[in-house]
Image (spheres, rainbow, N blue to C red):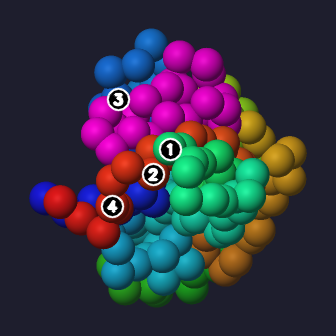
């Protein structure tokens, strides 16, 4: 199986979200579901949106100047945790809608979606930033996460049939320069 540096980081964060990491603080198994790579929260069918998520790396920055004598480098990685929620409101479906959908079905009104999304964001931040979820995530080559922090800029946006929570975070890591991340 081939990995790259950012794939290793995304896999670690995904395992925390899915509850499959062996750490002391992870999300409950089954609470969230990972979207397939060819979908986004915005393009997933509404009935598959509830608590589906993606982790999107949005930027990187080297924290010290690079030179060929370094045996490791320090980097900051910005990422978003994007979580979808199915949303219904009175009158959004006509009474004769196919598939049996009506204004009485779905996953809640604005207040319940809002409460669920911000509760989830609080739990995701606590899980990701818990100190025991840091450390070496791949022994060779070395990938050592030494901090994950929220950027305190969470947003919840409502669309016709879904709401999308974006949780902005950053992590700091030390990476070994003695191996190539192009795959192995």
Query: Which residue carries the number 2 mark?
Result: 177
Question: Residue at (60%, 75%) from the top-left corner?
Answer: 161
Extent of the magenta region: 128-148
Query: Which residue carries the number 1 mark?
Result: 71
Q: Position of residue 124 (x, y in %)?
A: 61, 36
How far apart marks 2 and 3 lie (CA) works out to: 26 Å
Question: Residue at (50%, 35%) from the top-left corner?
Answer: 144
Sequence-first disc among 1 and 2: 1
Residue 155 shows up from this direction = yes
How far apart marks 4 and 1 lie (CA) works out to: 13 Å
How far apart marks 4 and 2 lie (CA) works out to: 8 Å
Marks 1,2: beta carbons within 8 A: yes
Sequence-first disc among 4 and 1: 1
Which residue is more in the foreground, 36 or 139?
139
Sequence-first disc among 2 and 3: 3
Question: Residue at (58%, 64%) from the top-left corner?
Answer: 57
How far apart marks 4 and 3 lie (CA) works out to: 25 Å
Residue 110 shows up from this direction = no
Disc ID at residue 180: 4
């Amino acid at each position: 199986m081939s990995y790259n540096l950012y794939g290793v980081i995304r896999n670690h964060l995904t395992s925390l979200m899915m509850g499959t990491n062996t750490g002391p603080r992870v999300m409950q198994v089954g609470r969230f579901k990972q979207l397939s790579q060819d979908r986004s929260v915005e393009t997933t069918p509404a009935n598959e949106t509830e608590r589906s998520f993606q982790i999107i790396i949005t930027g990187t920055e080297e924290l010290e100047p690079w030179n060929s004598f370094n045996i490791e480098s320090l980097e900051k990685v910005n990422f978003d945790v994007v979580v979808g929620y199915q949303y219904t409101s009175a009158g959004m479906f006509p009474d004769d809608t196919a598939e049996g959908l009506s204004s009485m079905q779905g996953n809640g009104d604005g207040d319940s979606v809002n409460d669920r999304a911000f509760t989830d964001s609080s739990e995701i931040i606590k899980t990701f930033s818990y100190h025991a979820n840091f450390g070496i995530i791949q022994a060779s080559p070395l990938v050592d996460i030494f901090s994950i922090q929220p950027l305190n800029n969470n947003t919840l946006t409502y669309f016709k049939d879904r709401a999308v929570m974006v949780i902005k975070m950053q992590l700091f890591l030390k990476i070994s320069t003695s191996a190539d991340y192009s795959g192995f």
